Image: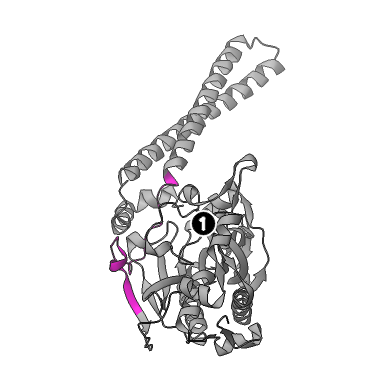
Amino acid sequence: MLPVSFIRNNKQKVLSGLYKRNFIKKNLINEILCLDKQKIETQIQLNNLLKQSNSFSKEIGKLLNKKKDINLLYNKSVVIKHKIKQIKNKLNDITNLLIDKLIQIPNIPNESVKKGHESSDNEIIYQEIDFKYEDIMLPHWELSKKFELLDFELSNKITNTGFPVYIGLCAKLQRSLIQFFLDKNIQSGYFEYCLPYIVNNISVYSTGQLPDKENQMYQIKGDNLYLIPTGEVPLLNCYRNKLLLYNELPIKATTHTSCFRREAGSYGSNVKGLNRVHQFEKVEIIQITTYENSYAALDEMVLHIKNILKMLKLPFRILRLCGGQMGFTAEITYDFEVYAAGQKKWLEVSSVSNCSTFQSYRLKLRYRTKDNNIKLCHTLNGSALALPRILAALLENNQMIKYIKIPDVLIPYTGFNQIKILN
């Protein structure tokens, strides 16, 4: 969340940032500033009344000590206290309305982020395109029939569409990928957590999913809890309300979780097979840094994921997202896409974002600087990596006529080097 003081002191910068995002509710900025002014004026009014009330209390005390009549001052004191109660209620109403409007404002994009709204507006900043594939290569949902990999009909029987069932060697391949990603993260200094998949509303609010992504999450209404849309939510909330020391930063953490998203409004070829599902496995990484080191941490995270994809020998590219394509909390985002040969399309497998102080303001996540000041931390997150589309690309890109080849780096995890065709 943006502090109202930042909006007050940087109105033009905020409006320019919102323009990059194609944010249509720009009138909210003027409404916020108007409410902010009302809040300041009301607070001054309250402070003056409190000062008067304290003065009356002292005078009443003096009169009581001298055994003099206090009725006149007492009556005035009662009137003042009644006014104080009214002003406090007014201040509370203004504050709540101000917060309701503030939480609708997304993070302001970095200067390097371009204006845009469509995926075609994103910038390709790196591409590894050393691949040649035959036209006859099949998409993973067709491969599943030949090699018994996934069962989408069984998922309909158990739950509904969007909850795929992984079978046999494909199930072990997914499990191997998870362990491979975790091992690579831990080797790079990320501390592992095993976390709940269900969180309270404070947790999803603190990391910016509420109110922005409320319709995308599964809610357990009777308990006011949510299934996590990403491991970032419980991982960052481990550090909510923390005051960290300078020498404790950066904090680097990783976790594997199932993730749950309703994906309301999804349609077309992009939703077929594993392309867009309601439950999927993901290995997440986060960093918590000082403000001066957050962009170095972003570069480090991008390089880390880049190296993992190179180890898997998948064709991939990195895009810097335009303003209108970025998530609500992000200041800058790099997307990783892998090429899926059977579908002949690029599939997003990771987003790496620097959220600056946007999440830490809600999380109340701060650090003590070298000169003993208190500042908000910067938070960064990324998928390292999301499983469904990685798995889809691995199956499609490594298919042969009678078997699917397993990448060399995964063989120590799988215990097999190929998945053979059914007899």
- Give the image location of residue 93, x and y in percent: 48, 32
Is residue 319 positioned above or below 278 on the image? below
- Give the image location of residue 305, x and y in percent: 50, 78
Going by the numbered disc 1, the residue's amino acid type is Thr
Residue 2 is left or right of residue 52, and the answer is left
Residue at the location (36% across, 76% down)?
344
Q: Residue furthest front?
A: 423
Residue at the location (57% across, 24% down)?
53
- Give the image location of residue 138, x and y in percent: 42, 77
Was residue 150 drawn as part of the magenta stretch in this picture? no
The residue closer to the viewer here, 111 or 172, is 172
Residue at the location (41% across, 81% down)?
137
Q: Quadrant of residue 61?
A: top right
The residue closer to the viewer here, 304 or 169, is 169
Which residue was labeled with disc 1? 161
- Give the image location of residue 42, x and y in percent: 45, 32
Q: What residue range appears in magenta?
A: 102-125
The residue closer to the viewer here, 104 or 336, is 336
Is residue 292 positioned above or below 84 on the image? below
Q: Quadrant of residue 195?
A: bottom right
Model colouring: one colour
Residue 193 is left or right of residue 141, and the answer is right
Residue 291 in sight: yes
Classify the position of the C terminus by image quarter.
Answer: bottom right
